[in-house]
Image (cartoon, grey):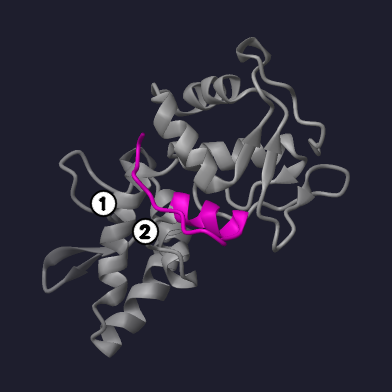
Amino acid sequence: MSRKQNFPSGKSIEENSARALFGALTDRVGQKIFSSVALWPDSEKGFTDSLGNYAKIVRWTAKRKGRQQRFTEARVHRAIDTLLEILVPALCRRDATPFKLFADAIEATNEANSVSFHALNLACELNGYAPPFNAVGERSAAEPGELKRLPKNFSALPVAMSESDFRRKIEAFSSQKIEAGNFHRLCQSLKITFLKDRRKGGRPSRKVVL
């Protein structure tokens, strides 16, 4: 399993999905910070130079007292605006919390797309519902005629296939081998149910809603 995560009983699918993706960053500010980190451009976008230092753009030059001076200006980008909107007020208040949340989010994004997150997303889609979040923490928007929005208090997801087939699909999504026993316990805690595997003598459930 990519992340050992406890899913308390009585939680909705959306709450479990948030917990699988964001970890401890489940409040509004934490989720915004997670999304900002997940969507942050890499060095190929020109934010850093070849040495990894912050890259600035030379805007113009001017001569002053016989010397030519170069004036630089920081890059303007939506990602930087989002960062400053969160951190500047925190600096003014001397509040360290958002800085810690950014550090936590960097670790969390490295663990994102966990087995539990993929399992919930696939189970939602198989039931005709739009998953609550995408891989970078943005809320999914259900379009008319496509996947429906997940009901608020919906707490169970029946899947019309065997657990072993479902596990193989999640292994393909997550690119990792999943131990069957751990996966069974995880699906139980996520309230994902399956058809019985006929090869093991079981009978398919009569009440499977798709």
Residue shown at 44% from the left, 66% from the top: 82
The quarter holding residue 79 reads bottom left
Kindly check if marks 1 and 2 are in contact, taking CB atoms under 8 A apart as contact.
yes
Q: Which residue is mark 1?
A: 55
Residue at 68% x, 14% y is 198
Q: Is residue 27 above or below residue 77?
A: below
Q: Quadrant of the C terminus?
A: top right
Q: Which stretch did the figure color magenta?
A: 1-21
Instruction: Return the residue nearer the eye: 11 or 196.
Output: 196
Q: Earlier in the sequence, mark 1 or mark 2?
A: 1
On the image, the x and y values in percent for residue 102 come to 31, 62
Mark number displayed over residue 75: 2
Relative to residue 209, is residue 96 drawn left or right?
Answer: left
Q: Is residue 8 magenta?
A: yes
Q: Residue furthest left?
A: 66
As shown in the figure, which amino acid type bears the numbered disc 1? Ala
Farthest residue in the front direction?
201
Image coords of residue 24 (percent x, y): 37, 62
- Residue at horizontal 61 percent and vertical 41 percent from the top: 192
Q: Secondary structure at mark 2?
A: loop
Is residue 145 toward the left or the right of residue 174 in the image?
A: right
Of the residues shown, which amino acid type is indicated by label 2? Arg
